[in-house]
Image: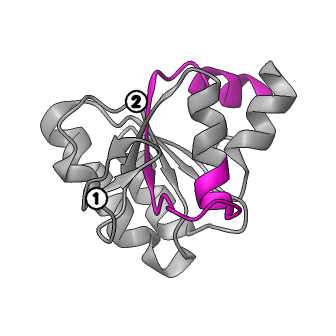
Amino acid sequence: MPITDDAGFDRLLDADTIAVVGCSTTPGKAAHDVPAYLQRQGYRVIPVNPFADEVLGEPAYDAVGDVEEEIDLVDVFRPSEEVPEIVDGVRERHAARGDAGAVWLQLGISHDEAVGAAEADGIDVVQDRCLKVEHGRLRG
């Protein structure tokens, strides 16, 4: 079952490094403003966007599997239909490197089948919740 309780959210907020899939270069878009907020809160944000070289002053990667640094949490700003492919990449990384132990699907994004597969591999998942909102509510 996806995480839906405050204790679970708070545990995931202990992350240091967050890879943001779909991180946008456009201020005013949630996929830009939420990661910028997370940076301001002290998180290391690693953008994953194959159409950008840099976002928020950080080099952008094409896929989660390309990120060189250790990842604690993968935050997803892509349509629900893209979630299985993204989660498969997280699952592969988790199996190979032991990191990327959590996936956070932003507000309006969900995919029960992909979530179930991730959870079966020991990856924590939140879906259809805003990371910024939950952070502000629990730690703001």
The residue tagged with tag 2: helix, strand or loop? Answer: loop
Highlighted magenta segment, given as a residue range? 5-33
Label placed on residue 53: 1
> Residue 51 location, x and y as percent?
32, 71
Q: Mark 2 points at which residue?
A: 72
Above or below residue 125? Residue 6 is: above
- The answer to whether residue 33 is seen in the rendering is yes
Above or below residue 21? Residue 72 is: above
- For disc 1, the neighbor class at 10 Å (few under 14, some 14 to 19, many from 20) is some
42 or 1, nearer to the observer = 42
Residue at the (36%, 41%) spot, across then down: 58
Left or right: residue 103 versus residue 61 is: right
> Residue 59 location, x and y as percent?
29, 46
> Residue 54 location, x and y as percent?
34, 53
Label placed on residue 136: none
Confirm or deny contact between disc 2 and disc 1 (CB under 8 A). no
Residue at the (68%, 43%) spot, across then down: 131
Above or below residue 69? Residue 77 is: below
Q: Which amino acid does label 2 sit on?
A: Asp
Left or right: residue 78 versus residue 108 is: left
Residue at the (56%, 66%) spot, across then down: 112
Q: Does the magenta stretch include residue 32?
A: yes
Left or right: residue 106 versus residue 85 is: right
The span from disc 2 to disc 1 (Cα, nearest Å) is: 22 Å
89 or 77, nearer to the observer = 77
Circle nearer the N terminus (2, 1): 1
**Residue 88 is drawn in which quadrant?**
bottom left
Q: What residue type is labelled 1?
A: Asp
- The answer to whether residue 1 is seen in the rendering is no
- For disc 2, the neighbor class at 10 Å (few under 14, some 14 to 19, many from 20) is many
